[in-house]
Amino acid sequence: MAGIGYGKAILFGEHFVVYGMPGIAASIELNTTCTYEEKVSGGITANDLVTGETINYGEDKAKKLDQVIQVILRETGIKEKNFRLKLETNMSLMGGMGSSAALGVSILRCLNKEFSLGIDDKRINEITFEVEKVFHSSPSGIDNTVSTFGGMLWFKKGQKNTVEQLGIPEPVRIVLIDTGTINDTAELIAKVRKQKEENQKEFEKIFASYSELALKARKEVENARWEKVGSLMNKNQELLRRIGVSSSQLEKIIEASLESGALGAKLTGAGVGGNAIALTPEKELQEKVSKKCSALGFKTFKVTAGIKP
């Protein structure tokens, strides 16, 4: 039985959600699947999606996948130790699509079915947050929440995270563009935190601007006023530039997307490398933006944002 964990795109809130400000994120149909295969002996094995190598659980505890399996076994109480997890994905693993959260959700949903654990989505979300800690020193919780529940979500981190489904009429077309560069989310979060400590007054202004922007964005998203959403995405990108998480590759993609008619374009995820997102509600526009970015040598994904699992 297969378990599926969906990818995500952040429309608003990268880095800002870490400091308790709200973000808007959406699930996308790109996903990771996990299939269970029983074994008579030989322990637990799984294929690493990044390197392709087979991981033998317990033999190389430095491997992230080994650590992920350890977390999941601990949190679920599964005692069976002879099976294979076959992992497959059509997502970019470069950063920005929530691939680590999708990995955790896919494994949990697969094992939940196979062992009849009776774990609900709330618990899957909680355990996947623990999985996220393996990859990111201080995860916001937004990736695992989107991968678990899907849709278009308003998210705010706190002692108890605020999560609200935004009632959009239907999913919206976007283009995700891969820079081809892997980023380290934990390092970038630490970099922004250091800059914040060194430039308190400047960051206070940036945070105030973002908080006001996020409230406007929620209203426009809920009413599917995509031109206004796009304009606000562009303003969000300007704030991300100011905190130092854009890059020349991302700027090249954003410029090409906007020149091709995208309503808005910005980085999505931790930044520097990873992916950009272009808002393209019409199919013809989505195709045009994708074609332009592909011609520049970037891999593109034409997807819809806000799907439900």
Image (tube, rainbow, N blue to C red):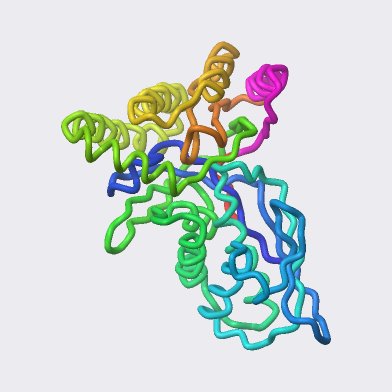
Q: Confirm whether the magenta stretch covers residue 301.
A: yes
**Position of residue 220 in the picture relative to residue 96 (left or right):** left
Where does the C terminus fall, quadrant-wise?
bottom right
Residue 2 vs 118, above or below: the answer is above
Residue 41 is situated, as x and y percent measured from the top left of the image, at: 81, 86
Q: Quadrant of residue 70?
A: bottom right
Residue 194 is situated, as x and y percent measured from the top left of the image, at: 29, 41
Residue 8 in sight here: yes
Q: Nearer the viewer, residue 210 or 92?
A: 92
Q: Confirm whether the magenta stretch covers residue 135.
A: no
Q: Nearer the viewer, residue 104 or 40?
A: 40
Residue 1 in sight here: no
Q: Nearer the viewer, residue 134 or 3?
A: 134
Residue 119 vs 283, above or below: the answer is below
Please give the name of the residue rendered at 30% of the width and 31% of the height, measured from the top-left corner. 213
Magenta range: 284-304
**Position of residue 112 in the picture relative to residue 56 (left or right):** left
Residue 132 is situated, as x and y percent measured from the top left of the image, at: 49, 60
**Position of residue 229 in the picture relative to residue 285 (left or right):** left
Residue 169 vs 293, above or below: the answer is below
